[in-house]
């Protein structure tokens, strides 16, 4: 039996868990689907939550100081981030850290966790905005002729 105190003050976590449980048994495939997001609302939420203190993306400039960790997001990529990967990166930012930033995380410079204050709609909007800022490019391959 789940105890209330585990989830107190964690509305986003509760909603995601309930959604997962409800949809896991309804025969619609694996996983769950969140509501549709809004790119403009996500861009706004990105700045409201001061994500640009550590990140730059598109027209949103990095606002941190020279000593802060700057992690650019978006742009051209040969491997698109899935919706699920982006959701996980927002709600559990330290689950997977790129090699170049591992030292910063080990030294305590981690992304803030917004699970207690961000609404599900804000999460969906931010992820929709982030996803819109990645642009797939075919990787160049240089295979010799046989």
Image (tube, rainbow, N blue to C red):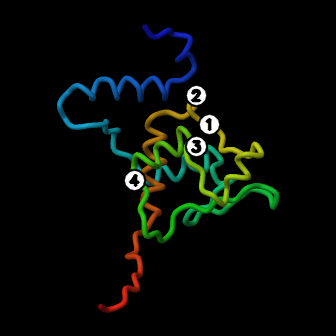
* Residue, far bottom: 145
Residue 86 x/y as whole percent: 47, 49
Residue 67 x/y as whole percent: 82, 57
**Dot 4 crowding, Cα within 10 Å, few <14, some 14–19, many 20+:** few
Residue to which mark 1 is pinned? 113
Query: Residues under labels 4 and 1: Cα distance?
Result: 20 Å
Residue to which mark 3 is pinned? 93
Query: Which residue corresponds to the image point at 29% horizontal and 24% vertical from the top-left?
Result: 22
Query: With respect to residue 5, does 71 lie above or below?
Result: below
Residue to which mark 4 is pinned? 82
Q: Would residue 144 appear left or right of 77 to someone viewing this image?
A: left
**Dot 1 crowding, Cα within 10 Å, few <14, some 14–19, many 20+:** few
Q: Quadrant of residue 31?
A: top left
**Dot 3 crowding, Cα within 10 Å, few <14, some 14–19, many 20+:** some
Circle 2: element type = loop
Query: Which residue corresponds to the image point at 41% horizontal and 81% vertical from the top-left?
Result: 140
Number of on-image labels: 4
| 4 vs 2, front mark | 4
Query: Which residue corresponds to the image point at 31% horizontal and 36% vertical from the top-left?
Result: 32
> Residues at badges 1 and 3 in contact (C-beta under 8 Å)?
yes
* Residue, far left: 27
The mark nearer the N terminus, 1 or 3, is: 3
Query: Residues under labels 3 and 4: Cα distance?
Result: 15 Å
**Dot 2 crowding, Cα within 10 Å, few <14, some 14–19, many 20+:** some
> Residues at badges 2 and 1 in contact (C-beta under 8 Å)?
yes
Residue to which mark 2 is pinned? 116
Query: Residues under labels 2 and 1: Cα distance?
Result: 8 Å
* Residue, far front: 146
* Quarter of the image that includes the C terminus: bottom left
Residue 64 x/y as whole percent: 75, 56
> Residues at badges 2 and 3 in contact (C-beta under 8 Å)?
no
């Amino acid at each position: 039996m789940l105890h209330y105190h585990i989830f107190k003050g964690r509305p986003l976590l509760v909603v995601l868990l309930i959604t997962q449980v409800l949809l896991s048994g309804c025969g619609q495939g694996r996983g769950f689907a969140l509501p549709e997001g809004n790119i403009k609302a996500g861009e706004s939420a990105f700045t409201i939550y001061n994500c640009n203190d550590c990140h730059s993306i598109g027209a949103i400039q990095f606002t941190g100081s020279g000593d802060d960790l700057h992690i650019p997001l978006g742009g051209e990529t040969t491997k698109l981030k899935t919706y699920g990967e982006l959701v996980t990166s927002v709600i559990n930012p330290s689950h997977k850290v790129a090699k170049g930033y591992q030292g910063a995380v080990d030294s305590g410079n981690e992304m803030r966790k917004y699970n207690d204050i961000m609404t599900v709609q804000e999460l969906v909007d931010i992820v929709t905005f982030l996803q819109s800022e990645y642009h797939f490019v075919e990787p160049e391959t240089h295979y010799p002729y046989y």
